[in-house]
Amino acid sequence: MPHNNARGYRGERKIRMMFEAAGWKVVRSGASLGESDLICVRGGKCVMLQVKTTKKKKFYYYEYMQPQLEGFPFYIVVDFGYGKIRVLEPRKAVAPSDGEDVKEFLKRA
């Protein structure tokens, strides 16, 4: 189990650093303290992120399933490894081709 927690923390840290490099202020709220792992704020916008990592070809998500959390956009970010990081609204099954590439999301947001 500690291995999974460490991998989760590394995934959150990687995403946090990507958002910060794109000009976002990021607060980590991980360790299962709430529905989102990262709260990201920039230019009057706020997005909530749940970060997941997997080595599998498909990821199954069973947690918070609404597109908004407390009135702010809520996304899951799934790191499939090898630079394949996807951002999307919550859904039960996520494949590496679903959603939007994190770099494209950061350009658009």
Image (tube, grey):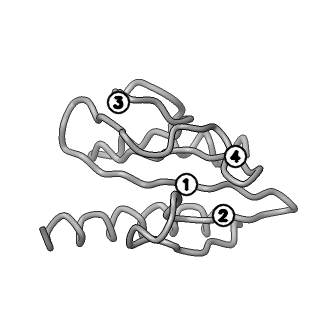
Amino acid type shown at disc 2: Cys
Q: For the residues marked 1 and 4, what is the alpha-carbon distance in whole angstroms?
A: 9 Å
Q: Amino acid at mark 3?
A: Pro
Few, some or many residues within 10 Å of mark 1 (<14, 14–19, 20+): many
Residue 107 found in image quarter: top right
- Comparing 92 with 95, the one in front is 92
Residue under numbered circle 2: 40
Residue on which disc 4 sits? 73
Which residue carries the number 3 mark?
96
- Rounded to the nearest whole Å, what is the CA distance between mark 3 and mark 1? 17 Å
| Residue at image point 59% right, 62% down | 19
Against 41, is 64 above or below? above
Q: How many marks?
A: 4
Report the Cα–Cα distance between label 2 and label 4: 10 Å
Q: Residues within 10 Å of mark 4 (few under 14, many from 20)?
A: some
Mark 1, secondary structure of its residue:
strand
Residue 101, image x, y percentages = 50, 37
